[in-house]
Image (cartoon, rainbow, N blue to C red):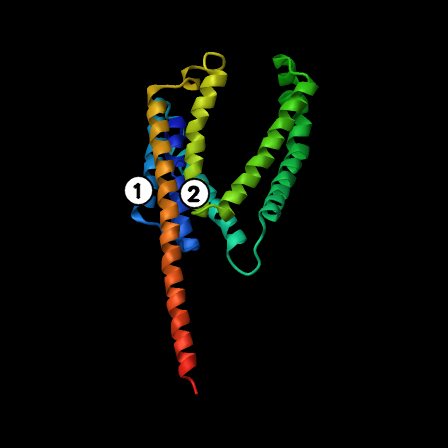
Amino acid sequence: MAGPTIFAIIYSSVTIWTAVFSKILLGRTMNFWQWANVLLVFIGLVITATDSVNTGKSVLKGSCFIILGSLMHGLAYVMSEGIMTVGEQRLSVVSNNFIQSSVNGGLFLLWQFLYTLPHFNELVWDPMQEAKTSVWHASILLGTFGISSVIHSFTYFHTLKHYPGGATSAGVMKGLQAVLVFVCTHVLYCKKVGGSEMCFSDTKFVSLITVCGGVMGYGYATPITEATLGRTTGKKEVESCHETTKLLSEYP
């Protein structure tokens, strides 16, 4: 509805929304350099939109859908981190991965039975015949996709729970993932499938450099922040222990 240009611009705001929700819901403190690099990643993603020229139909309605989806995506990052790091009852990485995957898998399976199966020939079998794809080949492709999804899920939840910056870091990495797709797309599909959008370009190169710079800058700023906060907290705890010891020693 909105077209690829507006989609690329709005959807890249996931990085920003993740940082905002982390501050609101998790009370995460970010310094100037962290915010600056989050914005740099956002700018790098927006640069890619200049390669697209289609505006699409029903732009306002489509933009509203993309904004809502971007908000929900960023919120999902933060909520997933929260249930693994906040409160007394916390989910482990494996438990969180299993529960969310089970719910998603169940919904997909329900869709297969209600919609895909009644339209199996039209949606699956006929396209397979046209592409000359065998059942064995399709099974290998789907199995590989499933394995990669499992690896992605575990690394995703591990990042949310254990990596400095949690959901915000994951959102920044999402930007890196987006621009690295340009490279893979160029290698696999350029001049083979689709048009010029499948090939690498000067704009995509600038975007890649910008986003990578933002990701590295954020990665450098985050450990500094964590270490600074750790030293400050540790210093306060030591001072508190000294005060307590002093009071106890003075007590008759």
Is there any visible trace of residue 1 in the rendered image? no
Residue 66, label in figure = none
**Mark 2 / mark 1, whichever is N-terminal:** 1
- The amino acid at mark 2 is Ser
Is there any visible trace of residue 197 in the rendered image? yes
- Work out how far the residue at label 2 is from the one at label 1, CA to CA, in angstroms: 13 Å
Q: Residue at x 42, y 33 (%)?
A: 176
Q: Pinpoint residue 43: horizontal percent, then vertical percent.
A: 32, 34
- The amino acid at mark 1 is Ala
User: Which residue position holds label 1?
Assistant: 36
Relative side of 195 to 202, left or right = right
Q: Pinpoint residue 248: horizontal percent, then vertical percent.
A: 43, 80
User: Which residue position holds label 2?
Assistant: 169
Q: Residue at x 64, y 43 (%)?
A: 102
- The local secondary structure at tag 1 comes to helix
Q: Pinpoint residue 18: horizontal percent, then vertical percent.
A: 42, 45
Q: Residues within 10 Å of mark 2 (few under 14, many from 20)?
A: many
Total marks placed = 2
Relative side of 217 to 72, left or right = left
Q: Residues within 10 Å of mark 1 (few under 14, many from 20)?
A: some
Is 147 rendered above or below residue 37?
above
Q: Residue at x 58, y 47 (%)?
A: 93
Q: Residue at x 60, y 28 (%)?
A: 145
